Image (cartoon, rainbow, N blue to C red):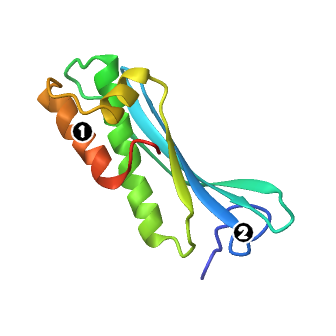
Amino acid sequence: MVIPRVLTKSSSSSATHRELHVFSKASSKAVATVVYLRFTNINGTNQTGFLMGRAKLAPQTKHSIPRLKLLAAVLAIEPTELVTSKIDLRIYGTTFYTDIKVVLGYIYHEISHVYVYASNRVSRIRKSSIPAQ
C-alpha cells in the first residue's frame, strides 16, 4: 500500500521557483530544526509545506546558550542535506534562520581566536552552506 504525502494543496512539481527555509532553535533543554519547502506557482502565489523536523535533548553538561544555538545551527545542516539529496525537485535556494547574532558572527567572520568547539561547528556549517544563506 502506498500512502501519498502531500506537501501542499497544489503540486510543487509544477512550481516555477522552489526554495528551502530552515529554522533552528535551542534552549537549555533541547535543540531543534525544521525544514520547509516554499514554492511559487505559475500564477504567482506562494505555498509552503513542511518537509522535515529534528530535535535533540540538550547535552547534560552545562553549555552556554550561544553554544547551544551553534549546535542547533549544525543540526539544521544535516536534515537540509538529507532533503536536498532525496527530494526529486530542483531547489533554487536555501535560507537558514537563527535567533542569535553570536552564531551569525561566528559564521560570517573568520576569527582566529574562536574556541575549538565553535571552530569545529562553524567549519561543519561552512562545509555545506555559505554565510550569505
Image x and y of residue 69, in percent:
37, 28
* Towards the viewer: 18 or 60: 18
Amino acid type at image mark 1: Arg
Say whether disc 1 or disc 2 marks the residue closer to the N-terminus: 2
Image quarter in which the N terminus is found: bottom right
Q: Give SS at disc 2.
A: loop
Query: Label 1, label 2: how many angstroms apart (C-alpha)?
Result: 34 Å
* Left or right, 84 with reference to 11: left
Q: Give SS at disc 1.
A: helix
> Above or below — where is 55 with respect to 70?
below
* Left or right, 83 with reference to 73: right
Image x and y of residue 107, in percent:
33, 35
Q: Are marks 1 and 2 in contact (CB under 8 Å)?
A: no
Q: Which mark is residue 16?
A: 2
* Left or right, 121 with reference to 20: left
Amino acid type at image mark 2: Thr
Image x and y of residue 123, in percent:
23, 43
> Above or below — where is 95 with respect to 89?
above
Q: Which residue lies under the disc numbered 1?
A: 121
Nearest to viewer (mark 1 / mark 2): 2
> Above or below — where is 89 with respect to 129?
below
